[in-house]
Amino acid sequence: MRISSNRRVVGWRALLLAMAILVVAPRPVPAQEYKGTKKYIYAVRGFVVVAVPAYLAADDEDKGNFCDSKTCMAMLGGAVGALVGFVIGSEVDSKNERKMAAGPNLDYTYQNVPLDITPERIAYFPGGAAVSGVGGARVVYRDGSILARGSGVRGIEDIAVVSGLDVLVVSTYANLISFPLRGDSVQGEIIDETGGGTLEAFDDRLAVAGLDSLRLLQLRRDGRSIATRELAGIENINFITDMTYARYGRVTWMLFEDKLAAYNNSFERLGELQLPAGGRSVRADGSRLAVALGSSGVLVLDATDPTLPRVVLEYTGVRFAYTADLDGDRLFVAAGPEGVAVVDISGTEPRVLGVARDVKFASDVIPTGEDEMWILDREGRRVQIAEFTQGGGG
């Protein structure tokens, strides 16, 4: 009986190991049209990996149980394993059906640039991008090289690149700090002791949104230092979620949760639009804007007249739009675990060209022209520099 007991212990340990294997089974390979067959594959796998150890654990000599043969124990254990596998496979099917619903796979190639920080923000400039997050800021160049900046700065809220001055500006609510965009020097310089949250740079100017204020600063180089001068300011203003500068009309667009407003270079309000939901980001391309609304999708606006911006198209093909950007007649939507959707918006209805799915969590995307985009993969802790074909789907 001791031998029988030992065999049972070994069998039950094998059973537990087999169920663990079920839980961490390999992810399915994405298909263009998801068939939803993983529940059956997992059920068969569950039957096999549980029935075998159940058979080994059984002893034909044991009597008195309702199932007192090796075959009965194997079938009973296999049925339990098949049920567990079916449930797990159904969840995998459901997850992948949701993931594939956004559209076909995008035919693209990419270079992954790993980061030693947890990235939160990205700001593109010709030739590269600046990234900030928990751990500081990094400058990433197109060849994959990285420069460390702001490693000792805590509480970074946003970043902006002033290309004309070769400067990276980092904001905290305590101050603004500038860093050289190029070279080996990592020394930062406090250029403003008021600080702020959201930043937007254009030419030699920097818009700084605080908790309840909005300031426009002019930056200039004074020897090796950067000097600032306040050109305009607004006090007691609502919290600004995001902002973007549109060279068309020289307008700065401010996103106040569920309201979008246009300001001229003197920070005089030109017009506004009530949004159907709280906005997460706003980006400009020519006379059009893209506003990401989270679970409510993306709005594309015609901003030819900044006093009367109007919605011309809505895209709701992803579960959650974290950010959205435009490049001509293409809309780019960072959709977290779903990847990045590239959408043709040349017609009256959006048409998905493809979805870049080889990322863990796409929190931001910036198209740079010539069929290229920079994807911020927050969970993957990397920047993905991607090139894709005009046709989209692969």
Image (cartoon, rainbow, N blue to C red):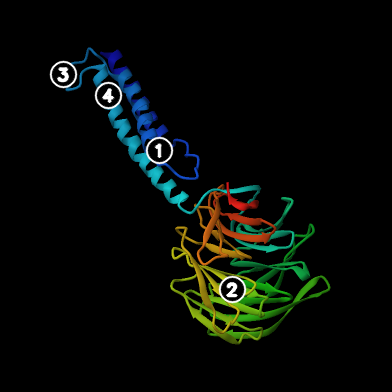
Q: Nearer the viewer, residue 99 or 77?
A: 99
Disc 4 or 1, which lies upstream in sequence? Answer: 1
Report the residue marked by disc 4.
Answer: 75
Q: Nearer the viewer, residue 316 or 89?
A: 316
N-term-proximal mark, 1 vs 2: 1
SS state under label 4: helix
Cα separation, mark 4 vs mark 1, equals 22 Å
Query: Which residue sits at x=64%, y=56%?
Result: 374
Task: Name the disc covering residue 243, or none.
Answer: 2
Which type of secondary structure does the marked residue at label 2 adopt? strand
Amino acid type, residue under disc 1 in the picture: Lys
Decide if residue 263 is on the left or right side of residue 69.
right
In front of the other: 29 or 58: 29
Which amino acid does the dot numbered 4 rest on? Met
Which of the two discs, 2 and 4, labels the residue nearer the N terminus? 4
Residue 150's place in the image compared with 269, above or below, is above
Q: Disc 2, disc 4: CB below 8 Å?
A: no
How many residues crowd mark 3 within 10 Å: few (<14), some (14–19), many (20+)?
Answer: few
Q: Residue 381 versus residue 98: which sits nearer the camera?
A: 98
Q: Which residue is mark 3?
A: 64
> SS at mark 3?
loop
